[in-house]
Image (cartoon, rainbow, N blue to C red):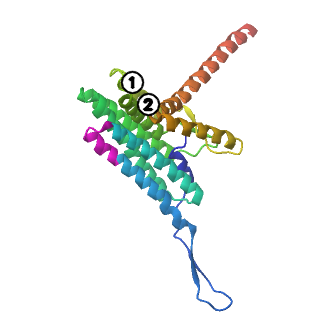
Amino acid sequence: MTTSEEVRNLQASEVQPAEITTATTEGGEKPRRRFNSKHLSILPNACTSMNLICGYLSIVMTSQGEFLSAGWLILLANIFDILDGRLARLTSVESRFGAELDSLADLVSFGVSPAFLVYTRYLSHDRFFGLIISSIFVICGALRLARFNVTPHSKQDVFVGLPIPAGAGIIATMTIFELQFFNFMRIPAIVIPFVVAITSFLMVSTIEYPAMKKTPQTSGKRKLVVALLLLALVVNPPMTLFFLTWGFALYGLTFSLLRNTVSLLRRLRKKPQSETHE
């Protein structure tokens, strides 16, 4: 899953003012102005701004009781978040300003907006408890963003902790899935606080998640996966997005538990052997 963290990987330094150069032809024609390609920084920044607007509109929809629209707006913010990374890579734009703008937009769209949605939709019956749980989500999201901004970028193709757009996707798809399939399935109210708390923990954890960046070795597989996902989205968007976001979150958690279990078993096996040699 591509996330806003790839944007900040690309936007590591200040954009210098665009250079304007002149060229004069042999015939003495008037000089032509040639603008530096860094003017194209407006494209990824525009997508980041749309990300922020979607987050704000989601909050407005939630306040009016339009929970389904609010959930879809969070997912739309995810799309703009992916696009600004792709455009930043395509135009080779590096901007510290863009990185900071992206972090602020992410906090609103993927931190405040889903927290307000889950509180209003599921937790408002117990105001004090609901405010605590939803506030934890916002705080963990902010800590996730801050930690990423000050941590040196890993050489491995992984993210440390669940990316905040994926965390917001869990809340949004949970709401969309329930409203779209209300007659078939309703998530028990007692489960909601655990979902929010576990998602918050995953964002600030050290569990590794695949960044799934494009490489020559994986480009063919990625095309096949993308094609299958697009087909599934056309057939059934709510269910596809639900299993995609939840599966991604559970993927890192499951493999982390397996690695820790295997490591523990190896240590337990080595311990009796060392005692026998003594």
**Circle 2 sits on which residue?**
199
Q: For this view, does 241 lie left or right of residue 139?
A: right
Magenta segment: does it hold 65? yes
Q: How many marks?
A: 2
Mark 2 / mark 1, whichever is N-terminal: 1
Which quadrant would the N terminus be assigned to in this image?
top right
Query: Residue flagged by tag 2: what amino acid is it?
Result: Thr
Query: What's the magenta bit mostly, secondary-structure-wise?
Result: helix
Q: In the rendered image, is residue 104 in sight?
A: no
**Circle 1 sits on which residue?**
194
Quarter of the view holding residue 32: bottom right
Relative image position of residue 123 (x, y in whole percent): 29, 28
The kind of secondary structure element at disc 1 is helix
**Over which residues does the magenta segment extend?**
56-67
Instruction: Compute the Cα span from label 2 to label 1.
Output: 8 Å
The kind of secondary structure element at disc 2 is helix
- 88 over 37 or under it: above or below: above
The residue located at (46%, 39%) in the rendering is 164
Query: Residue flagged by tag 1: what amino acid is it?
Result: Phe
Quarter of the view holding residue 259: top right
**Residue 104 or 120: which is nearer the viewer?**
120
